[in-house]
Image: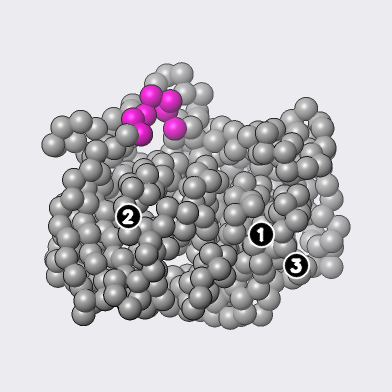
Amino acid sequence: MKNMKLTMWCSVAFILLASRTTGQDVKTNYDESQVPTYSLPELLITNAGTTVVNRRQWERKRRLEVLDLFAAHMFGRVPNHVDNELRFEVLERGLTLQGSARRLQVRLFFAPGRNAPALDLLIYAPVGANRRNPCPMFLGLNFMGNHTVTTDPMVDVTKSWVRNRTEIGYQNNQASAAARGVSAERWPIQLLIESGFGIATAYYGDIDPDFDDGFMNGVHALYPKGDDSNGQHWGSIATWSWGLSRILDYLQTIDAVNPKQIGVIGHSRLGKTSLWAGATDPRFAVVISNDSGCGGAALSRRQLGETVQRINTSFPHWFCDKFQDYNANENALPVDQHMLIALIAPRPVYIASASEDLWADPTGEFLSGRLAQPVYDLYGLAGLDMEVKPEPNESVGDHVAYHLREGKHNLLEYDWRQYIKFAQRHYALKK
Ligand code: GTR
């Protein structure tokens, strides 16, 4: 693999770290001047050393190689006997938000039988004056159950395993109705409906509960890890992403939804998930990564904030076992995260950071968007046409867009307003 020196970033004064990070006791680096010099793997040179010069070569050869490298070294592979044909059952439907939206709750079963593991999908779609028929839609997983995204009393309280949180009544790994609406700030349903968008969400724990359980529960339990997995068996992020694709299968069957205008969105670990979903499933028309950080939009080689070793220690189940080989060894990775963004081309991708979220490395998130440009260039599409990240609260870019929201690690209305505008622009919708 031939490496390209990142001379254009020299002005940012990268300094070679004398010693490589070796253990958990290594202090987290938040200092730009301590970012090691690094060379990124080549985006447009194939494994055999040929330079890719057009989109055909990218699509037929290099894109497939890069996808495979991410699956093999980072996210893991979906077992090839996975059943992608989910059955579904409508649980409930009704009018809500003063008659401006329709609510639909649907169960998607991962296996035959009424007691099979299943995912509960919650959908709101605009009706009446706000209605575009069919409507564009955002799809994103949520962290604590569908009932937490809204105070709507008709939404079912999840029965899946949840992390205990006494402050919202989650005990013995069971959710509670007391948590209705606790995440509503992250889900501005009214704003989306008024803007003519539908919104679909499901609890990520329905697909795979978020703890290191040795492949014992969720979809993982249906497809146990074989001895022949080579450390490449799918981790939780790959499984959540696969779940997003299965939800997309279902959404594409609903008449009220425009199958060509379904965007995928996620915050934090679910931002990593939306990027991998967008990379693996070209049916997602727009891809949004909110504060996704390490393993998401942030370049691993910068080692600023959360590192590969830290994430693999705290959350080993998110990635495949092979990813552990890169603990304190980022330069050996055959990919870096600009290549994940490039896999989404030519579709529009929006990367967002928050100014106080240094753990997620905002500069590294911006750079991966910027450095995906050679692939967007193959399509003649503009992306992030600037060398340094913009000031806070300024949305920049075209097919690759970026903002640094003032404030903490979160998904807030400011972020959504940018995503709505971004999707409206790319779908050429009137506001
Ligand atoms: C953190 C983790 C991040 C991010 C975040 C989240 O603890 O280190 O990579 O994913 O969790 O998902 O909330």
Q: Which residue is mark 3?
A: 385
Q: Quadrant of residue 380?
A: bottom right
Residue 382: % across, % down: 72, 62
Q: Is residue 41 visible?
A: no
Q: Amino acid at mark 3?
A: Asp
Residue 346: % across, % down: 64, 52
Please indicate whether residue 22 sits to the left or right of residue 370 in the image.
Answer: left
Please indicate whether residue 23 sits to the left or right of residue 331 in the image.
Answer: left
SS of the residue under disc 2: loop
- For the record, the magenta segment spans 78-84
Give the number of the mark in front: 2 or 3. Answer: 2
Q: Amino acid at mark 1?
A: Gly
Reply yes or no: does residue 79 show up in magenta.
yes
SS of the residue under disc 3: loop
Q: Quadrant of residue 360?
A: bottom right
Q: Are marks 1 and 2 in contact (CB under 8 Å)?
A: no
The answer to whether the beta carbon of the residue marked 2 is less than 8 Å from any atom of ligand 1 is no
